[in-house]
Image (spheres, helix red, strand yellow):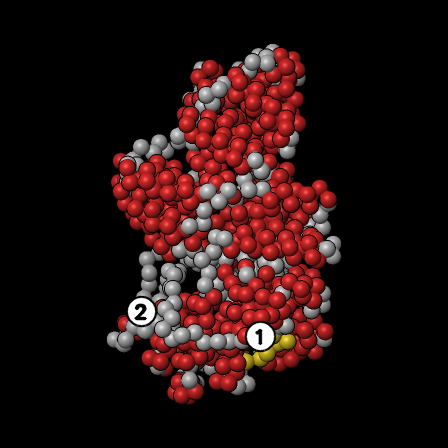
């Protein structure tokens, strides 16, 4: 049995290995106990694995003379991240048994994890001498050369690995990365297309779809994989990769509908060759609930999560449950859920990362730093988040590591970009401004390579909104909306002070800070369906507003009030601080003629720099503009034009809050703000940074520091780099040709505000 288990482990047939270990009637032998520990690691139960190893290896490793056993102990140490113990154990094996190719391979992995690339190369080359047909060793050497920047050599090793094992997906992916850096990935894609013409096989669809995904050609990847799924409906790999592509594109609604469809008719799972059929069903349910959370269907997601059998044995349960609680501003409860998850899965990076985010959002920064240290111990690349947690104070060694991550073509562009954004902040803190901005340009360019953003789409909507919202329309609908004063809307360009303003207001006893709510955009996107229900022409936004009457305005307002009541049903006032609501001020003030609208005003160039410095999560959505200085300039021009229009149509109903004044004379400006909102003065609004309510935006750390002036006129540090945005700002708002056709992308479809409901 020991020999069979070891063979399964070496062959990476982990499912069979786990089944065989579970079938063991006893684990009296030390080798069996080591295999049991490895099975715990494979299941994510690191704490139990470490405890078992500590109990089992009472005899010192040096006194064990079974070299296969020693090698497997070394593997267990490696899998647990105990690199020092792994190295000493495996070195003792190869010293005594120099022809053990498996142990040389494992020792190479230890050296690689330690960053000892030359030692790793020697160990893997020795392993390859002993086992020349091992695809995994060829792959490892390819990764090593990829990290060293020897791209042609890396491609050669990946090709050799694929000749030995054509199904080695990792080699396909890394080869595509190397070819992408050599500007040769297009020829590889063309080869795959030709192969697909010759034979329609699932493996070819997977290779082509995955390579297109890596190359950032997302619409093409979606098309290829959708065809593959249609042709091979039993292949779970194709389905899963298609969902990954849709998520990356931001097509959450489309992805959700597909996963729901696959779960409703499970016959394909029964007919497929998937081994763990029940596990696949659970994986799909967790995936569907992840998509529901992203689409803000929190109630439906929470209900289904609680109904999954054995949910506590899955890390995704704790992560998704915490996300739902955090979105409902129940950050303290979210942290407690994740602490329980950490107890069960002490080294699960997803749980630990989410715990850091939640702790940071509720101001528990010291605990967050401790958790982050654990993450870095498990994954050295997590230095990105660690330096963030330390407020961008980095050692020279950390700076060197960040630079290597930024420049490593072996890593996904998203990881490289994240390293670049953090390195920029480190260099800025060191006042090395020129080098900081050069790094920032590189980070933004890495993100841009995978975007399909077109600034003209927003320009088109802006000019159509200005055309549709006429004084005559406003006069006809003025005062006919819902009379409620409950909503307060804080809006303006992202990074203009909206989060700061919300936190100030949210520190008032009569106000609930709800964060960035998507309810107004949902109402706008639903207009054609609602008009169709009413027997009217189903026009979209913004043209559809001309068909509105008192009934529809009040229905929309009631829908909005019901949605915010699900978040809080007690506070007299609720703040919605979605910055891009500046596009919908006309709709807001027609729906709620008594609502308070607060518009943040900040120096355009300060806003431009601050946006350019952020690695926004919504890069495939509303925040795509932030990764190019010219695009930022166009968005600033749109913002200025639409806000000037709203001020003309609704004089006196929009309060312009000057960010610079707020930093210079906070008490005076906050008093004016409260007076505008018809709220009595409370001293605690000056200590807003002490609140435990969660902050979920890019300003998560800044608002914990109180009001500071250092970000005012920050742009002057980088003035020589800002010509692209300055030129666009000087150009001003120029309407597009009316024949321009906007490229609409699928958006998350909302729940209707007069009865229309999409399937959950």
* Left or right: 5 in relation to 357: left
User: Residue at the location (48% across, 19% down)?
Assistant: 132
Residue 361 falls in image quadrant? bottom right
* Left or right: 659 in relation to 748: right
Under circle 1, the secondary element is helix
Q: Check the image and report above or below for 315 versus 683.
A: above
Q: Check the image and report above or below for 434 versus 33.
A: below
**Viewer can see residue 335:** no
Quadrant placement of the N terminus = top left
User: Residue at the location (67% across, 64% down)?
Assistant: 720
CA–CA distance between discs 1 and 2? Answer: 40 Å
Closer to us: 116 or 358: 116
Residue 200 falls in image quadrant? top left
**Viewer can see residue 413:** yes
User: Residue at the location (66% across, 42% down)?
Assistant: 401
Residue 714 falls in image quadrant? bottom right
The image shows residue 169 at horizontal and vertical percentages of 43, 35
* Left or right: 203 in relation to 121: left
Q: Which residue is mark 2?
A: 529
The image shows residue 600 at horizontal and vertical percentages of 59, 73
Quadrant placement of the C terminus = bottom left
Q: Check the image and report above or below for 697 versus 190.
A: below
- Sequence-first disc among 1 and 2: 2
The image shows residue 151 at horizontal and vertical percentages of 53, 37
Q: Which residue is mark 1?
A: 730
């Amino acid at each position: 049995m020991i020999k069979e288990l070891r063979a399964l482990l070496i062959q990476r047939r982990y499912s069979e290995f786990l089944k065989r270990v579970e079938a063991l009637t006893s684990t009296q032998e030390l080798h069996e106990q080591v295999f049991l520990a490895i099975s715990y690691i494979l299941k994510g139960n690191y704490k139990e694995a470490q405890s078992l190893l500590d109990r089992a290896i009472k005899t010192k490793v040096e006194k064990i003379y079974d070299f296969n056993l020693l090698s497997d102990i070394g593997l267990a140490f490696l899998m647990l991240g105990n690199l020092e113990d792994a190295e000493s154990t495996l070195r003792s094996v190869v010293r005594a048994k120099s022809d053990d190719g498996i142990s040389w391979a494992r020792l190479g992995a230890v050296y690689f994890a330690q960053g000892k690339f030359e030692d790793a190369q020697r160990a893997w080359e020795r392993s390859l001498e002993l086992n020349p047909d091992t695809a995994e060793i060829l792959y490892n050497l390819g990764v090593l050369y990829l990290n060293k920047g020897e791209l042609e050599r890396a491609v050669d090793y990946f090709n050799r690995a694929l000749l030995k094992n054509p199904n080695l997906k990792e080699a396909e992916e890394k080869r595509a990365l190397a070819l992408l850096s050599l500007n040769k990935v297009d020829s590889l894609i063309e080869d795959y297309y030709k192969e697909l013409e010759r034979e329609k096989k699932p493996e070819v669809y997977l290779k082509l779809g995955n390579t297109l995904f890596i190359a950032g050609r997302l619409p093409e990847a979606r098309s290829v994989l959708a065809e593959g799924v249609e042709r091979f409906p039993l292949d779970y790999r194709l389905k899963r990769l298609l969902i990954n592509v849709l998520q990356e594109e931001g097509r959450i609604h489309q992805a959700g509908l597909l996963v729901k469809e696959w779960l409703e008719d499970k016959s394909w799972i029964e007919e497929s060759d998937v081994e763990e059929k029940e596990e696949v069903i659970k994986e799909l349910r967790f995936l569907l609930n992840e998509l529901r959370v992203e689409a803000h269907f929190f109630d439906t997601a929470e209900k289904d999560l609680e109904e999954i059998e054995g949910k506590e044995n899955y890390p995704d349960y704790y992560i998704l449950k915490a996300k739902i609680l955090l979105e409902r501003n129940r950050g303290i409860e979210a942290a407690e859920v994740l602490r329980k998850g950490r107890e069960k899965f002490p080294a699960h990076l997803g749980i630990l990362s989410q715990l850091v985010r939640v702790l940071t959002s509720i101001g528990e920064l010291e605990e967050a730093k401790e958790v982050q240290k654990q993450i870095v111990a498990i994954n050295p690349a997590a230095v990105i988040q660690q330096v963030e947690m330390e407020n961008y104070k980095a050692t020279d060694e950390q700076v060197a590591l960040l630079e290597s991550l930024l420049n490593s073509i072996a890593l996904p562009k998203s990881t490289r970009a994240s390293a670049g954004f953090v390195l920029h902040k480190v260099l800025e803190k060191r006042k090395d401004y020129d080098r900081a901005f050069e790094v920032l340009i590189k980070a933004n360019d890495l993100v841009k390579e995978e975007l399909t953003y077109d600034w003209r789409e927003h320009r088109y909507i802006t000019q159509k909104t200005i055309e549709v919202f006429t004084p005559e329309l406003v006069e006809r609908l003025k005062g006919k909306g819902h009379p409620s004063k409950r909503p307060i809307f804080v809006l303006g360009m992202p990074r203009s002070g909206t989060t700061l303003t919300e936190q100030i207001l949210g520190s008032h006893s009569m106000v609930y800070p709800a964060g960035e709510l998507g309810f107004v955009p949902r109402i706008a996107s639903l207009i054609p369906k609602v008009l169709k229900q009413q027997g009217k022409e189903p026009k979209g936004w913004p043209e559809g507003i001309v068909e509105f009457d008192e009934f529809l305005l009040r229905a929309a307002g009631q829908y909005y009030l019901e949605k915010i009541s699900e978040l809080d049903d007690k506070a007299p006032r609720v703040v919605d601080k979605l910055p891009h609501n500046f596009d919908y001020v006309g709709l807001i003030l027609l729906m709620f003629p008594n609502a308070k609208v607060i518009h943040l005003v900040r120096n355009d160039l300060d806003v431009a720099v601050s946006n350019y410095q952020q690695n926004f999560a919504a890069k495939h959505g509303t925040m795509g503009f932030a990764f190019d200085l010219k695009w930022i300039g166009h968005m600033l021009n749109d913002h200025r034009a639409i806000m000037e229009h709203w001020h003309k149509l609704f004089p006196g109903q929009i309060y312009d809050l000057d960010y610079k004044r707020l930093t210079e004379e906070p008490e005076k400006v906050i008093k004016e703000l409260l007076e505008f909102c018809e709220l009595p003065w409370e001293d605690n609004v000056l200590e807003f940074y002490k609140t435990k309510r969660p902050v979920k935006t890019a300003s998560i750390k800044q608002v914990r520091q109180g009001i500071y002036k250092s970000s005012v006129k920050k742009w002057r540090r980088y003035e020589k780099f800002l010509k692209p945005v300055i030129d666009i700002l000087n150009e001003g708002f120029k309407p597009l040709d009316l024949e321009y056709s906007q490229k609409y992308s699928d958006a998350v479809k909302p729940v209707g505000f007069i009865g229309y409901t999409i399937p959950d």
